[in-house]
Image: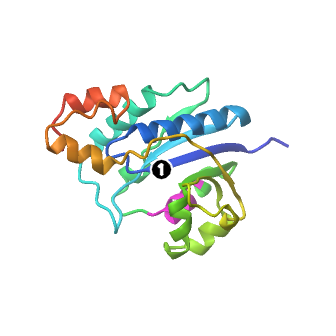
Amino acid sequence: MKKAKKIIVYGGAFNPPTKAHHAILQAIVDEAKKNDNQVWLVPSGDRPDKSIGIDVNMRLKLCEALMKSIDNQGVNLELVDYELRTNIETNTLESSLYFEKKYPNCTFIWVFGSDSIKTMRTWPGGEQLFSSLHMLVIPRPDFDVTSLPPKAKILTVNALPTSSTEVREKLKNGHSVDHLTPEHVARLLGSSSLY
């Protein structure tokens, strides 16, 4: 019997990608390398609680720039635009069900920050997600690891807490963001007037 392919799914707005996103993605690739997994970078679409506000094609270019900055070590790292290309608002439950149906021979491992774990049960389908999704959880210093979901494991990432909001504000005010974003992302941001 053929072993199921495992795919680590790292979703987020990445608006724009920061050095924190870079550190997380590199840690995910390092983890995938150990277990012969694939990695999918999945930029989120608009949601009821968050509108992204920039062109889909530019979002994809920003994610591609993030991926260029990663040492993929032979790991299959793919940009998956499912959420961006749907014309409806998406959420984690819908995306997980879609991927499971489309790729029934794959096991998906979802990446979340511990702040998401704390609120997950309040999301659409949150109880189902909490109990059934395979997860890698990136803990914040105050996170109680005894509250992990049943199919979760910790992924430690050494990243400075740089937010995309901070990067957008600096760009709006005409400041450099080279120290906050990966090199390829900084170049792309420098050559456009997105924010």
- Asked which secondary structure carries label 1, the reply is strand
Where 12 falls versus 34 (above or below)?
below
Disc 1 packing (10 Å; few <14; some 14–19; many ≥20): some
> Residue 47: within the magenta?
no
Q: Main secondary structure of the magenta part?
A: helix
Which residue is the extreme one toward the right? 1
Viewer-proximal residue, 36 or 106? 36
Query: Percent position (x, y) of residue 126?
Result: 55, 72
| Left or right position of 63 against 77 | left
Residue drawn where x is 54% and y is 68% of the image: 118
Residue 154 to residue 187: above or below: below
Side of 151 relative to 56 (left or right): right
| Residue linked to disc 1 | 11
* Colouring scheme, one of rainbow, by chain, secondary structure, one colour: rainbow
Magenta segment includes 95: yes
User: Is 54 left or right of 32, judged from the image as shown?
Assistant: left
Give the position of the C terminus as an image quadrant.
top left
Residue 59: x percent and y percent? 31, 42
> Vertically, is 34 above or below 9?
above
At label 1, the amino acid type is Gly
Count of numbered circles in the view: 1
Query: Does residue 107 appear left or right of residue 122 in this picture?
Result: right
For the N terminus, which image quadrant? Answer: top right
Q: Nearer the viewer, residue 138 or 59?
A: 138
Picture quarter containing residue 194? top left
Q: Residue at x 51, y 62 (%)?
A: 116
What residue is shown at x 35% (from left), y 39% (from top)? 60
Give the residue at x 67% y 31%. 33
Q: Position of residue 92 (x, y in %)?
A: 50, 62
Q: Which residues are magenta?
A: 91-99
x%, y% of residue 64? Answer: 39, 32
